[in-house]
Each structure stands twice: as C-alpha cells, then as structure tokens.
Amino acid sequence: MHALDWIVPLPKTLTTGRSHVDLSGCRIQPGPSTATAALRALEPADAPAGRPGTGEPVTVEVRVDAGTELPPEGYTLSAARDRVLIVGADPAGAFYGAQTLLALAGSPSSCPEHRVCVPEAEIRDWPDLPLRGTIEGFYGTPWTHADRMEHLRFSGRHKLNAYVYAPKDDPFHRERWREPYPEEELARLAELVAEAAARHVRFVFALSPGLSMVYSDAGERAALRAKAEQVWEAGVREFALLFDDIPPELRHEPDRREFGTEEGASASAHAAVCRDFAAEFLAARGADRPLTMVPTDYAGTGATAYRDRLAAELPPDVLVWWTGPDIVVGEISARDMTAAAASYGHRIALWDNFPVNDFDFDRVFLGPLTGRATELDGVPLEGVTANPMVEAAASRIALTTVADYAWHPAAYDPARSHERAVRLLPGATELLPLVEACSSWPPGADQSPVLTSLCAAALKGEPSERLRAELTRLAGLPVDVPGPIAAELSRWVAAAKDMAAAGLAALDLLGAAPDARSAQAPAVARALARAEEHQANVLRRVIPPFVRAALESALEQAGP
C-alpha cells in the first residue's frame, strides 16, 4: 500500500523515492510553534538514532517563507537522506506540512527497519477553497465539550480550517440569545477557542436572534453586541448572524413600520442588523474577518424579493451561507453555485447539510460526500462548511471526505476518499459492513442499490450466493469494537445484525423444499418482527420488503 493511501486530504503533487528517511530520534528545528509542537510526536523518549555513518539525528526543519510563491495555507515538504524541510507560505501552511509529515510517518507502508520513518518525498501542496470546515448547526442534542475538542483536533489533522459554533439547541445561541453565558459555559468556549487557534481552525461564533428580535430596536441591537462582547473577551474573533428557520414575514409592529410589509421586507431588517453589527462591533474592534450571515431564504437558486433586497442592502463584504438547490440535496452543480451567488449579489459559502441527520435521528449517514461540483474555476464559492450528525465521532467518516473534497475539488474521488476515511478512523474498518449499509445519499435514495438488486434476483430464483455472503457479513458484525465510533453506532450494529438475520432466514425459506416452507414461515416472520423492533434504521427499505415477498412467494408455492 502506498504512503498516499494514508493522507487525507490528498496532496496536490507528490513524488516518492525508494529509500526511507529514518526519523527515529529526529531533531526538530524551531519554527511556527503549532507546527513544531505537532512534530514532537516524532521525538522518542530514548536516545536518538543516528544517520548512517554519522551518529547524528536527522533534522526536521519547519519554517515560514512568504516568498515561496504558494497560495495561502500552502506548503512544500522535502524528505531526503539527512534532512526533512517543511516550508509554509504562512503559519497555517507550515502546520499543514507538519500534519502531512505525521501522516507519512504513521503509515504502515513505512519500512520495517526503523521505528519511525518516511519515504523520500517531494510535496508541493495548497488548498483550492479558502473556507473548509464544519458547522455544528443541527437540531437535537448538541455535542459535548469533549466531542468538540476532539473534533478540533480532527479538523487540524485533515486541514479543515473552520468550525462554526451554532447548535440549535444551545439556548444561549438561539432562544435566549440576549442572555450572557454562565461563567462555566464561557470558560468552555474559551477553551475551544484556544484549541482551535492551536490547530489553525477558525472558531466562528454564531448567534441566531431571529425568533424574537425586534430588528428596528436600538436596544435589541445593543443586546446583540453585548452578547458578542462577552465571547470576544473569551477570545472569539469571527462571528456569524443566522436568520434561518424563522417566519419569513416581520411580526413586530415597530419592524413593520420601519421596514415595510411588502414581500421580502424582512431582508431589509436582516441587512440592517448586519450593517449595525459589522460597523458598531466588528469594525470598532478591528476584526480581521468580515461577518457571515444566513438569510431566511437560504435554499434555491433563483431571484426572489427577499434576495433582491438583501443584495442591495447587505454590506458588500458580508459572506452569505446557502444550502444548495434545496435544504438537503444529492447534487449541487457549478451552475447552481453561480446562480445562487448572483441571486444574493454576494459571494457565497455552501452550508452543506451533509451528513446531518436531525430530520431522522434513526439514520446515520456514513458514506462519502457525493454529487458536488468538482470543476469550480470561476465559481464565486468561498468554501464549504458541512453540517454533521448528532453522532460526533461517527460523523468523522463522512467529514474526512469533505476535507478531501474541499482541499482539491478537481481531484476528488468519492470512493477512493471514503476508503481512506474508513482506514484512518479507529473502529470504522471493523464495522465496514455497517458503514456500507449506511452509505447512501441523499436520504431519499435507495439505501443499498446493490442489495436491492440482489434481493430482486433472489426472488426471481436466480443464484443468491452473493446476497447470502453480504448478509452474513452484516450478521457477523462485532459488538466489542473499542472506541467512540463503535460506541455511537452500537444501536445500529444491533439493528443491522437482526436485519441481516431476517434476510438470511428469508433466503433459507426460498431455498427450502415446498413441503417444508409452511413450517419455516413462522420463524421467518418472527425474525422480521425482531428486526423491525429496532428504531435504528438499517436497510429498512430494502430487507423487510424482500422478506415479506419471500414469505408470500414461499407460501404460495407451498400450496394449501
């Protein structure tokens, strides 16, 4: 297996030689603090190994050079016999170069002669999209603090550079947006901000005041700024205002007098709040990054009265989030992106509702990102923030593929990326049959086209060896896999095992002698009932219809 098979996202250009560079006991030369700190993992506790014939450790040097002629966040990595050199276009690039070196060093493809080594390599790498990240923006139980801390570490490893804090069910984010965070909550936010900075992840704090805000009220705008001031003191430097999932019309009489009652009038209110926040809060504090906002009209590609007003009244540097042609979608084309940006009159970022499951908590989406445009030259897209599942660890399977896509869309291969994601995440390989059974996207798609076809063939009397093999794999899922992914997916593992058992019982019924089918049928029905008792949805649209059809067919053939 090639060393590249252990790196996500895939570097732009990489050439490797046949020899290896022994990093056992390497000496880390000073560089950007977060990059050299990351590389300390390569230094052993015992005495350093020497270069052949010299007795000296290999030097790993990390530095920043703005004259590299690389885009922002780009880096070069050169690993030769006696030296490893990482040069970043900026501190983030140096950090990403360090992550690539760590991925190479952790690859099982390293040679067996050394405790830690990497192949001789030359890499030149940079991202295509400036914004690559995630947004904790789902309904349902928010992630725990530990989930978020681990997610930030995961993001840094895979060169995701943004995390947006926007959990719908955090009351201080949405329903009680005026109220300051309690000290304990604020301390946790400060810890997240510090961890994000150490991983070169932009921590974006979002507020969602639209359920109750009187937009024209100066006191309400001051309350919004005061809430932002509290988290600014905790270290937050980037903000977003969200006006999604609220009534489209203005409900407060002062707002109706101020902004009117015509169609799209709420856009004027939202733009006014954004203008105030950008000028009176962000600009007053010298914030480096402009505001991001979510409009109420956040899906679709055509012009609307709301979007026309927003385009005219929103400050030109405000970034607009958009979810695609619809809210949860299977495909988003470059034409969709260009049309959406034109309709808003602003540069857009894709709020990708993938692999989110807040519309159906009984499902998990463990497959790769698919259906997203890969040729983005000239497309006014700032980047992608993916909205994950309530299951934070299990979301990393899909999010690893999002990182791969966002770094270099033109080279993105969903199947290859998914294979790497499963390989890299502890517990995913052991649960591969479940991962495959829960990989379809979008949510309305066939849950498993392969199994659906095999079931149809079996009902026609065609050979069913492959179907039996696939169901046997699923029925044999282990229940003792360690780690957070397996813990989060335990109820889907149990559901999958019983669903597969029902499918196998149906296959046995189809293969039984006609005079034995009546006797076997009750056991098959009981197996199906057990499978359908689970709330966790694994192949519920595939296996139960097959089992019922098998029962009907077998009993018809059995005769009176």
Image (tube, grey):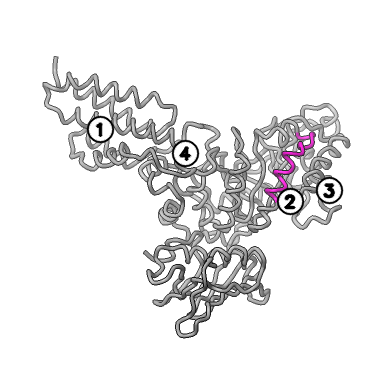
Image vertical order of residue 547 relative to residue 228, above or below? above
Q: Are marks 2 and 3 in contact (CB under 8 Å)?
A: no
Q: Residues within 10 Å of mark 3 (few under 14, many from 20)?
A: some
The residue identified by callout 1 is 504
How far separated are the C-alphas under marks 2 and 3?
11 Å
Three-letter code for the amino acid on which mark 3 is drawn: Phe
Quadrant of the snapshot with the N terminus? bottom left
Q: Reading the chain from its start, which is encountered first: label 4 or label 2? A: 2
At horizontal 43% and vertical 51% (from top left) the residue drawn is 422
How far separated are the C-alphas under marks 2 and 1?
54 Å
Q: Residue 180: within the magenta?
A: yes
**Residue pushed farthest bottom?**
53
Q: Is residue 263 left or right of residue 169?
A: right
Q: Secondary structure at mark 4?
A: helix
Q: Residue 358: give x, y in percent of width and height.
A: 55, 34
Q: Reading the chain from its start, which is encountered first: label 3 or label 1? A: 3
Q: Reading the chain from its start, which is encountered first: label 1 or label 4? A: 4
Q: Nearer the viewer, residue 176 or 301?
A: 176
